[in-house]
Image: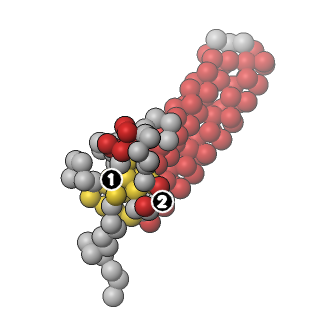
Amino acid sequence: MRFGSSKVNEFRLWGLAMTMGGMLLMIIGLAGIVFDWGKAGRIIAVIFMIIGMISMMVSMGIYFWAGMLSTSATVIDCPECGRRTKMLGKTDRCMFCKTILTVDPQYEPTAENETAVAQTVQLEVDRAHEHKPH
C-alpha cells in the first residue's frame, strides 16, 4: 500500500486515474480535428479516441472489480476512530484514519518497528452484525 490507504480505496483510485486518463486522451485526440490538421489530424483523432475508450472500459472494469471485492470484504469497527471500515485480506488499513488493521497474529508488527506497533491493532472479526440470509 504505497499511499497508506485501504485496499478498496486504492482500487478506486486506479479506476479514477484510468477514467481521467482516458478522457484526457480523447480530448487530446480531438485537437487533430479542432486545429484542422487535415487527414493526419483525423487519423490522430481516431487513434486517440480508441485508446481513450479502451482506457475508459478498463476503468469501468476496475470499478466493477472493486465493487465486487467491497461486497465480500469483512466489515469491522476501527479501534482508533470507531467507524465501520472494510478489510480485504489479513491486513489492511482503516478507510478513514489509515490505522493498520490485522486479524492474524502472524502479521502483528515486531518490537523493532515501533511506529507500526503504535498504529497496529489486533482485531477479532465479529460477524454478529452481518446479515445472514434465511
Residue type at mark 1: give it: Val
Q: Is residue 19 above or below residue 42?
A: below
- Name the foreground residue: 29 vs 91: 91
Q: Residue at x 64, y 11 (%)?
A: 35
Label 1 to label 2: alpha-carbon separation:
13 Å
Q: Please name the residue that numbered disc 1 is placed on.
A: 121
Q: Where residue 121 appears, x then y in whole percent?
A: 32, 53
Query: In what element is the residue under mark 2?
Result: helix
Name the front one of labels 1 and 2: 2
Of mark 1 and mark 2, the one earlier in the sequence is 2
Residue 11 can be seen in this image: yes
Name the residue at the bottom extreme: 134
Q: Please name the residue that numbered disc 2 is placed on.
A: 106
Horizontal placement of 21 versus 129: left or right? right
Q: Where residue 134 appears, x then y in whole percent?
A: 33, 88
Badge 1: residue crowd in 10 Å (few <14, some 14–19, many ≥20): some
- Name the foreground residue: 129 vs 117: 117
Q: Residue at x 41, y 45 (%)?
A: 111
Badge 2: residue crowd in 10 Å (few <14, some 14–19, many ≥20): few
